[in-house]
Image (tube, grey):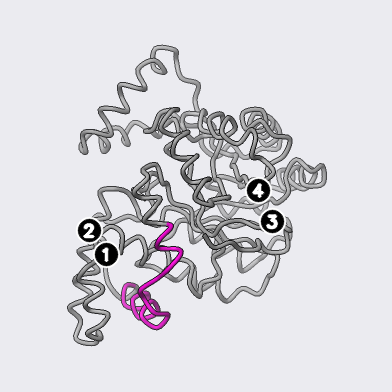
């Protein structure tokens, strides 16, 4: 596993993080604990969750797992999207619902259309910040979080002076080591132009067909900033389309025979290697955070991080040419639940 210093925070973490969005959402408690243990045993030390993940229960499972490991990991959570409390009968049906959703592909699409109703978005007030953090700390069984991200914040967040003042006080109190923002690429790009000295951690979704944001990141000279990229694979239904698009790229007349051979053989493992290195190599991104609920995905991602068959020049060529191409119809690499 590779590790990286996170800006000037004094924190050090694995470049491969564990995304906890599926924990207690589409994945139940026991398999989630198994996945967390496998990642930790493999050297993963960055764990990313949120108050809204798993209908408000993701933090509890992560806190249970990290109870004896807290000082050996970097723990990030988010506030600003609150889960709507579930009725008891709905909670009781969740295990059966997970079986159906995980076993029937079309059920995932049907379920997603109902998910937004389960959350209260844009809860970006000083009071919600305080109460949300206290709930997070209690569920995570810790007295502090290493990074607290404002969740899916609009650019207008920079004008919420009361909220920013509240964040600053929490950092000073030691309950937060680093404050940051998790947002869409256009919001992150604006924040990079007007760097707020309080928001030193920036998390954003990755789209390998649009490297413009990583270009902005690599050009930034603020040493204190921490960059975390999430959703690199875009969901189970998108992986096959990504592979097909890369095979079409292999048909280019400008490609070398060696690279053509690599891209024509792009199975799930090679895709993991390629995507993770496109995100991390020469971009300024510190950590990439996929979901790795299956052991095979974790193992493929670790191999992809540890060694890369693609040269720096080949990665640069792929990154440039993907940016010039239109992704397959319906391809959205910013889905919450990624395959890897």
Q: Dots 2 and 1: beta carbons under 8 Å?
A: yes
Task: Identify the mark nearer the N-term, 4 or 1.
Answer: 4
Kindly identify which numbered label has been placed on residue 327.
1
Q: Find numbered disc 4 in the image and state the secondary structure of the residue it sits on.
A: strand
Task: Say which residue label 2 marks.
Answer: 241
Residue 57 place in picture, x, y as percent: 51, 28
Vertical position of residue 281 compared to residue 166: above or below: below
Mark 3 lies on a secondary structure that is: strand
Magenta segment main secondary structure = helix
Label 3 CA crowd tier, 10 Å (few <14, some 14–19, many 20+):
some
- Residue 129: x and y in percent read 67, 37
Q: Residue at x 21, y 38 (%)?
A: 105
First in sequence: mark 3 vs mark 1: 3
Label 4: how many Cα within 10 Å (few below 14, some 14–19, many 20+): many
Q: Which residue is mark 4?
A: 147
- Residue closer to the observer: 262 or 333: 262
Q: Nearer the viewer, mark 2 or mark 1?
A: 2
**Dot 2 surroundings within 10 Å: few (below 14), some, or many (20 or more)?**
some
Q: Which residues are magenta?
A: 302-322
Q: Earlier in the sequence, mark 4 or mark 2?
A: 4
Q: CA distance from mark 3 to mark 2?
A: 37 Å
């Amino acid at each position: 596993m590779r590790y990286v210093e996170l800006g000037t925070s004094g924190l050090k973490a694995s470049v491969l993080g564990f995304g906890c969005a599926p924990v207690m959402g589409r994945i139940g408690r026991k398999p989630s604990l198994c996945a967390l243990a496998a990642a930790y045993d493999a050297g993963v030390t960055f764990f990313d969750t949120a108050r809204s993940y798993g209908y408000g229960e993701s933090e509890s499972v992560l806190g249970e797992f990290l109870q004896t490991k807290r000082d050996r990991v970097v723990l990030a959570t988010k506030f600003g999207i609150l889960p709507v409390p579930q009725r008891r009968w709905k909670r009781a049906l969740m295990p059966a619902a997970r079986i159906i959703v995980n076993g029937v592909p079309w059920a995932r699409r049907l379920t997603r259309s109902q998910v937004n109703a389960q959350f209260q978005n844009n809860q970006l007030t000083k009071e919600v910040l305080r109460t949300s953090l206290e709930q997070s700390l209690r569920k995570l069984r810790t007295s502090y979080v290493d990074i607290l991200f404002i969740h899916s914040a609009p650019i207008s967040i920079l004008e919420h002076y009361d909220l920013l003042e509240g964040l600053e006080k929490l950092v000073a109190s030691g309950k937060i080591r680093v404050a940051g923002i998790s947002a869409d690429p256009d919001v992150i790009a604006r924040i990079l132009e007007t760097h707020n000295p309080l928001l030193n951690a920036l998390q954003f979704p990755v789209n390998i067909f649009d490297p413009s944001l990583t270009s902005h990141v690599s050009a930034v000279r603020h040493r204190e900033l921490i960059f975390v990229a999430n959703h690199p694979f875009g969901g189970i239904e998108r992986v096959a389309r990504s592979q097909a698009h890369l095979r079409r790229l292999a048909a280019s007349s400008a490609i070398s025979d060696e690279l053509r051979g690599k891209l024509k053989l792009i199975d799930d493992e090679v895709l993991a290697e390629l995507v993770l290195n496109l995100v991390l190599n020469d971009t300024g991104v510190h950590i990439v955070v996929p979901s790795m609920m299956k052991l095979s995905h974790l193992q493929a991602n670790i191999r992809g991080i540890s060694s890369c068959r693609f040269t720096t020049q080949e990665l640069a060529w792929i990154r440039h040419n993907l940016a010039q191409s239109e992704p397959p119809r319906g391809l959205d690499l910013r889905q919450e639940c990624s395959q890897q």
